[in-house]
Amino acid sequence: MPNGTVTTWIDRHRIAGFLIVTYAFTWTIQGLLAVSGMEASWTHSILIGFGAFGPPVGAAVVVWASGGSLRTWISQIFAWRIGTRWWLVAFGLPVVILAVGSAIYVLAGGPVDFGTFPSPLVLLFVLAWGTVWGGGQEELGWRGFMLPVLQERYSALAASFAVGGAWALWHLPLLLNATTTHGGWSLSQQLLWGVTIFAGSILWTWMYNSSGGSVLAVAVFHAGINAMGLYHPADLATLTQDGIPDPWLTFLAEATGAIPLVATAVLLVVVYGADRLANREVPGPEHVGLD
């Protein structure tokens, strides 16, 4: 197709165009890593992170092809003036979710070994890394583009589920790569992860809408939730019996990480309502530089 025809098609099919470019970018890079046989390493981790820039690349292509403002779209990652309250939520809610999940885990009889508790300095590094390379970089696409475009026609909850489905499928190369954390999961772990993806999508929507469309806040929140996995008591204990992985303890670890996340998502829908998931007008296409 001539170039003008391509850009016209993308402008008319913004979500489809976004997903095509996003998946093509990420699946090509992470798919090649999956079949390359490369062992887990810092280089491997950096390449995985580079592949995760598919969503912002997809969003940039659609905004450009649609004649939108790339400057307006990308400015969301610098939107830090959201009020002290929301920064406390972005940094503090992951800790609350961790505390609730940990309490459930301990009460259910899960083993704890605080002798291997990571240093708080590790958390600072993981938060910084997670914001710019280990997950947060996705948000200029998922929440900084796809969500507000969908919210022009659909409720915030429906848009969250649509983004969650696309987000989950996007992870396919990681699920097929035995050298990644995702690739080492059992079927039950993958199913629980799928549930948390949709719950997380609701939380991320709530943060994005409530902060007035701050991708920076969502990226920090995303990194914070991911980082809490390091401090869950199950990750401080050896989930094995006589050197053999214990299926019950493994399931308990995953479930107690998922339960508070799902419960929080349900509570947010009840409190804020499915229509906006916020107490303010929600960002639409104009917020990301589109007409």
Image (cartoon, rainbow, N blue to C red):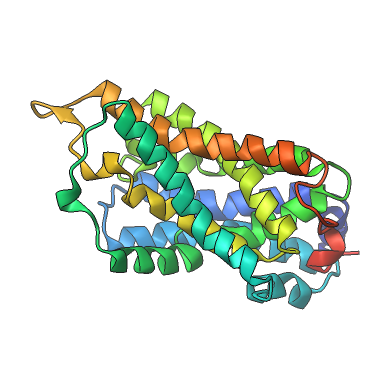
Please tell me whether residue 283 is drawn above or below residue 159 in the rendered image: below
Q: Position of residue 216 (x, y in %)?
A: 61, 68
Task: Write down the quadrant of residue 263 in the picture.
Answer: top right
Image x and y of residue 21, in percent = 66, 54
Q: Position of residue 286 (x, y in %)?
A: 86, 64
Q: Can residue 269 be seen in this view?
A: yes
The residue positioned 62% from the left and 47% from the top of the image is: 203
Tell me the quadrant of the picture where the N terminus can be found: bottom right
Q: Is residue 132 left or right of residue 24?
A: left
Quadrant in the picture for the C terminus: bottom right
Instruction: Determine the residue positioned at 85% across, 42% down.
Output: 154
Residue at 30 percent across and 65 percent down: it is 120
Q: Which residue is drawn at 44% across and 60% down?
A: 134
- Pick the residue in front: 20 or 248: 248
Residue at far right of view? 291
Relative to the observer, which residue lies in front, 174 or 140? 140
**Residue that protrudes farthest toward the top in the picture:** 248
The reply to whether residue 169 is visible in this rendering is no
Q: Quadrant of residue 255?
A: top left
